[in-house]
Image (cartoon, coloured by chain):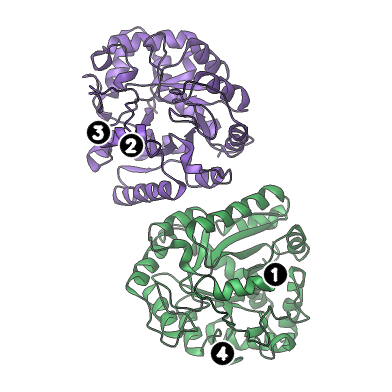
Chain colours: A purple, B green
Amino acid sequence: MAALLVDGLQYANWSEKIFRQMREGGVDAVHVTITYHETFRETVLNIEKWNRWFEQYPDLIFQGRTAADITRARTEGRTAIFFGSQNPSCMEDDIGLIEILHTLGLRFMQLTYNNQSLLASGCYEAEDSGLTRMGRQVVSEMNRVGLVVDMSHSAPRSTLDAIEHSTRPIAITHANPASWHPALRNKSDDILRALGQSGGMLGFSIYPHHLQGGPDCTLDSFCQMIMRTADLMGPEHIGIGTDLCQDQPDSIVEWMRVGRWSKTIDYGEGSASNPGFPPMPDWFQDNRHFGRIRDGLRAAGMNAADIDGVMGGNWHRFYETSFGPADRQL
Amino acid sequence: MAALLVDGLQYANWSEKIFRQMREGGVDAVHVTITYHETFRETVLNIEKWNRWFEQYPDLIFQGRTAADITRARTEGRTAIFFGSQNPSCMEDDIGLIEILHTLGLRFMQLTYNNQSLLASGCYEAEDSGLTRMGRQVVSEMNRVGLVVDMSHSAPRSTLDAIEHSTRPIAITHANPASWHPALRNKSDDILRALGQSGGMLGFSIYPHHLQGGPDCTLDSFCQMIMRTADLMGPEHIGIGTDLCQDQPDSIVEWMRVGRWSKTIDYGEGSASNPGFPPMPDWFQDNRHFGRIRDGLRAAGMNAADIDGVMGGNWHRFYETSFGPADRQL
């Protein structure tokens, strides 16, 4: 079987067009965001929407639950869709919902989205107080059932706390090294080193606010950054996490940033003069363009085995040991 | 492997004591009621409660999802717990919740509980208007995902409608022939014959209001009734559905009957002078006493193969073809 292709995060305005582009691009699996600030019941409504898409487009997509679904997707010529949440709103204040959401297929959950949550501090808070009392309980429960802790939008101390407290490797599904581009959402070398040493995974983001030079970032600069991060973390601990928000109206980035927590606008990574979704770099517009990253890594001098790992093999291996109880694969 | 033992319905005040009695009685599987009038979110809270029991008593019970879990239960010396709902309140007015509830393990759902629902008429309504517009849609969706239609508390025309409209066999998990004991909850020979001819299943209830003579019903009378029903429906279409409500306080029977639909008391099958749970017959008090029914059927002259079917084999076969999409076993 040729190398697998897995994207560590997307949040698109899903449509048949996008599902067909996934097939055209040979994408075997995508971790998709299904919820941000939604309550449990609202998150279930979002899953219902996905269930309709699975029913409507069975030749293009199906719900992924285990690592084996990635190879099954390859064999059947479809794309496996794995669910994730970017905020713990979906579990409300009820630790029992962790197992319920896992049963419904949730495989990643961020402990925070920019702000302080019940569990930890977000990367936009002035104070980073680390994992809360409930946060420690929830991480243990996530470890028990096999729901991956994702700290992409979390603050540094909280992230290090999660790496330390979690008995299983965690993920930062969509971010880049701050040493390459100093955004609040990007991660320090200390965090990335600790993440790699603990067996965790980093997915490289192509969301322009996370890129050196924004939308003008070159493919070569992106690939050189990947090479350096392979040296820092180990080449088996990195993958892609495009953060592709294809075809979304700007009202959605407002929902992502503001949810219902504020009555005034918060620009997050944007600004008053640049409030909407930024344009993607010309070398990555949609799911048909992963081959360009593969070519870029080759041009940058990465060896073939490491490229296969970055493009999907590493996520596949991580999925194999992350989605079920610790004592057995799901 | 010796004959399987499956109970088609219980709603006990669950405890370690009862789980141990299941093991003592060699009960391989039980369809348990997890919800009556609860909303979706409240039903999820009930599942969370079950998840805690599964975590707490893994040597006694586990969640059953497929027929194979019954034989697994036998092999591992545990009891498989299959979820069911006695009313469609848990799906609210949202057909998308059918698949969500199935994913969470729901395997049976009654279309009505005594009253008119959004889907059909209950057995206590003066008018029985049959399956509603939504009821027909919901039955089709239940057929699609593999959630069994249960008409135990439904009115006659609605029950016949469901048998006819459903493309897959349905169940009456806990009731008896009205020809033996004319309760509103018991079923006419016409219904039972149609149920058997369509491949459906009847589970014989031991709830005293469904028994000839109530709590004084003899084991012999119960077993003779089973023999006659085997002749009427075919011996492969019958099983046990005790409706055991062990250790429940009378406040629970009031919840079952009144839920939140009325501000005044409704006695259901009881009466002002007999409002609580009736005492069970002396020959069946709890899960340790299924052997007595087996002995009773033998004494009544039923052959060994038919007895094995009634005590569990028939439910096992029904589970095999009922819990997944129609085109494949789950």
Calculate the distance from the C-alpha at mark 1 to the C-alpha at mark 4: 26 Å
- Please name the residue shown 34% across and 18% down the image: A210
Calculate the distance from the C-alpha at mark 2 to the C-alpha at mark 1: 47 Å
| Nearest-to-viewer mark from 4 and 3 | 3
Q: Amino acid at mark 4?
A: Ala
Calculate the distance from the C-alpha at mark 4 to the C-alpha at mark 2: 58 Å
Q: Could you tell me how many numbered marks the image carries?
A: 4
| Nearest-to-viewer mark from 1 and 4 | 1
Residue B248 is labelled as: 1
Percent coordinates x, y for residue A300 in the rendering: 33, 7
Density class for disc 2 (Cα within 10 Å; few <14, some 14-19, many ≥20) is some
Q: Amino acid at mark 3?
A: Asp
Q: Residue furthest front?
A: A263
Circles 4 and 2 on the same chain: no
Using the rendered view, name the quadrant where residue A6 is placed: top left
Which residue does the numbered mark 3 point to in the structure image? A250
The answer to whether any part of residue A67 appears in the image is: no
Which residue does the numbered mark 4 point to in the structure image? B178
